[in-house]
Amino acid sequence: MKKNFLQKNIGLTINAIFTFVLLGLVFLGCTKKSNNIILKQNTQTEKTTQKRTKEKTKPRIGFSIATDTFIIERWNKDIKIFSSEITAMGGEVLFQLSAGGTDAQITQIEFLLSENIDALVVVPHDSDLLSGVIQQVVDKKIPVIAYDRLINGVPIDAYVSFDNKAVGMLMAKSLTQKCPHGNYLIINGSKKDNNSYEVNRGVMNVLEPFVSRGEIQIKKQIWLEEWSFDEAIKKAEEVFALSTDFDAITCGNDQIAEAVMQLLAERRLAGKILVTGQDADLSACQHIVEGTQFMTVYKPIKALAARAATVTMALINGKPEHPDEYVPNKSSKHIPFYCEQPYAVTKNNLAETVIKDGFHTEKDIYRNLIEN
């Protein structure tokens, strides 16, 4: 096209030719569109365009979640708070979200890497299987922050999470205070999540002295492949088909507890067996005041997401925050761990914990009781 134009317009001046070419390049640049859908949590300009360019005026953070639990309400809270904190600090976030597995997450991270990011925050679907693509990010000197779940096998820059061993200890301590003798069932979370093992370690740390004295019998302990309500139903059903002679059941999270309570209700055992969970989901808090779930563990998401944002921006600016401790991750170094503390929640302290923090409202928690 340019050749025909020049042939037909020999009389153009050098300046005119230059202007034409320049305008053409600008036009081509402005009309190039991305084929990827990006969830950007930033300024009002997001509402008017989905066009992407490689030019940046502010730090850009990629955030990848590919997890079977994305539908769980807590992840929505994490995303909203993290985005708000980063925006307040002058950055922008490119989210890649799906309920897919590890392959989907690898694709997400590769896409984010192509988007000229300054840091990568990851909630790993599998703690071990992302090492290849994460190593690519590390090799490009881009800070990598493992959010909530540890990434193994690569010397990443930071790990921001709760004290998951303490989560398990809070569950078990609450149970042993209420039920120091009896039969226990332990339903652990996903085998792919390092947190599941830490929670289990905390549970067993508390229960082992009771077991050694013969006061508590762990009748069954099972593990899930995924953080899945359906899988929890299936595996708990198999256990209950053989026996429901349990005094207490620890569950990896509140969705697993929900599955267990559904099965107990079908057997008219709801509220007769102590059930614990974690995450302080609204439904769990409702079950607690209704008397069908004994306790949950509240993990202040606002504190976690805000700290992750601070740690991320500090790494981008070359001034990393001092960690609470260092943890191994099967790589060549121990990883800086920024640790937030969880809290046990029962019917007696809902007002001082989740309600006081604005995590849930009193009206929402007591809604079912009021309606009935």
Image: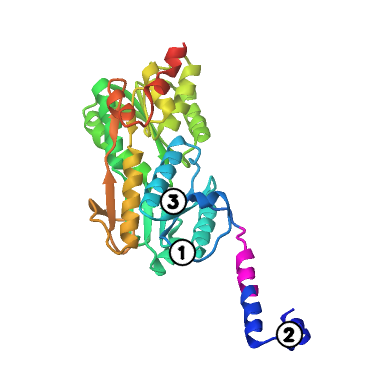
Q: Callout 1, which amino acid? A: Lys
* Observer able to see residue 225: yes
The residue singled out by tag 1 in the image is 56
Q: In the rendered structure, does residue 27 fall within the stretch colored magenta?
A: yes
What residue do we see at 55% from left, 48% from top? Answer: 47
The residue singled out by tag 2 in the image is 6
What residue do we see at 43% from left, 13% from top? Answer: 370
Horizontal side of 86 relative to 174 (left or right) equals: right
Distance between the Cα atoms at labels 3 and 1? 27 Å
What residue do we see at 30% from left, 58% from top? Answer: 314
Horizontal side of 194 relative to 344 (left or right) equals: right
Label located before the other in sequence (3 or 1): 1
The residue singled out by tag 3 in the image is 124
Label located before the other in sequence (2 or 1): 2
SS of the residue at dot 3? loop
Q: Residues within 10 Å of mark 3 (few under 14, many from 20)?
A: many
Question: Residue 321, how many percent across, how many down?
Answer: 25, 56
* Observer able to see residue 152: no
Distance between the Cα atoms at labels 2 and 1? 35 Å
Residues in magenta? 24-35
Q: Callout 2, which amino acid? A: Leu
